[in-house]
Image: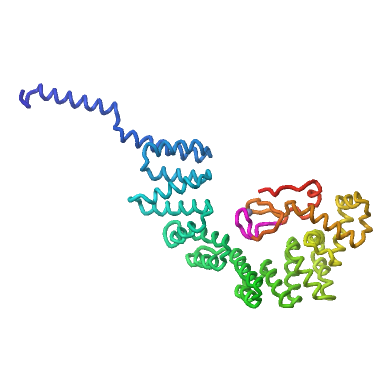
Amino acid sequence: MSIHSPWFLLGLLFIAGAVGFYASRRPRPSALGAESVRGNYLAGVNFLINDQHDKALEAFLRASELDGDAVETQFALGSLYRRRGEVDRAIRIHQKILARPVLEPQQREQASYALATDYLRAGLLDRAEDLLREISQAGINRMAATRDLIRIHEVEQDWESAIELHTQLARVGKPRQEVALLHYWCELADTARRQGKLDEAASLLRDSRMKQQGFPRGALVRAAIALEQGDAGLAARLLTEVLLADPAMALEVLPQWVRASQELGEEGRSLVASVLEARPAAWKEFAFAAVMADTLDHPELERLFRRMLESDPNLSGFVRALGRDPTDLKPAEVRDLGKVLRRLAKGTTRYRCAECGFASSAHFWQCPGCKTWDSLRPVTRFDFVAGLEGPKAPSH
Ligand SMILES: [Zn+2]
């Protein structure tokens, strides 16, 4: 049969049609795989958005089974494992991505930063720091890496490095966190003070003098230096300014303030009265702080505490239940009551973070929960009664 024969051409057409029919009924395996990987990946993302982490994990794992080379699926899995607290698995996935011989530069940057974040989460600060230092030099995650490095320096209390990085951020146009910077300077100055280097401590505060104006912690550190240098007048002046600006700081200020007023003698006795004249409503803050800071031997503060015992119905009831008359207490009895109430109030929540709600019985300049500076505010200043009902565990 000649190739020009009509039968031959008809035969060819038949074969072509049969192949076409077969191909249309059965898609190529690679096309099927790609489609399912995509489908599972998108389903996983959808589950993630709806906070269905278990289902998301299932979908990503399925996508990974179908195509282990799909890097976006590996990133999704790594990040999901970290969110679930399975940091070891996240680390292995991100290390594996980085070990690939072929990787887009942007994917390499993403994998490095993801791995550094894993290390941070796992508390492997040394490894995180090495990686972040590299990432902070260039690339899309430069800023985020610098901020993470600052956090590490805060944990390590390496204040000088933290100051340096803040300055670096300022150079690339990102606004500096002035409050954080001021705290770093205060930390440096206070460390120098504790080491007995009083002049160095004072000059560290002076270096950022313009910014220290009206910054309560700066005034507290400077006052502590002044007290050790024998300058009770300067200490009293600085601490009084803090109290006038914010009576809620009484608990932090009172111990030093009482010391300054005692050293000033006659002149110091009028300090409490002078602040109360300007801020009469602050007397309760002072009375509470005097109990908590164990400064009831100061006559003015003892008087305020007596006033509290008489006027607060819960406290006067408590005193009466002990068989005493709140209006007629001996000085020793007042001090004993102070001791009991201090013990009762110690376990109760007294500060709460305005940013994350972290609750604590002690004061922190930096919130242990969200790491924000100056966000802890006193909440239940007079909660002696909660202590009578039994101590509460600090809530988060
Ligand atoms: Zn917080």
Q: Is residue 362 above or below residue 270?
A: above
Per the image, is 94 magenta? no
Residue located at (53% from left, 43% from top): 84
Task: Name the residue at 62% across, 76% down.
Answer: 200
- Ligand 1's quadrant: bottom right
Of residues 275 and 382, the one drawn nearer to the viewer in this rendering: 382
Magenta-tinted stretch = 366-377
Name the quadrant containing residue 295. Answer: bottom right
Residue 63: where, in percent of width, then height? 40, 37
Quadrant of the rendered image containing residue 26: top left
Q: Main secondary structure of the magenta part?
A: loop
> Where is residue 138 shown, x and y percent of the image?
42, 61
Say above or below: 228 vs 38.
Answer: below
| Residue 209 vs residue 133, the one in the foreground | 133
Q: Is residue 372 magenta?
A: yes
Q: Residue at x 90, y 62 (%)?
A: 331
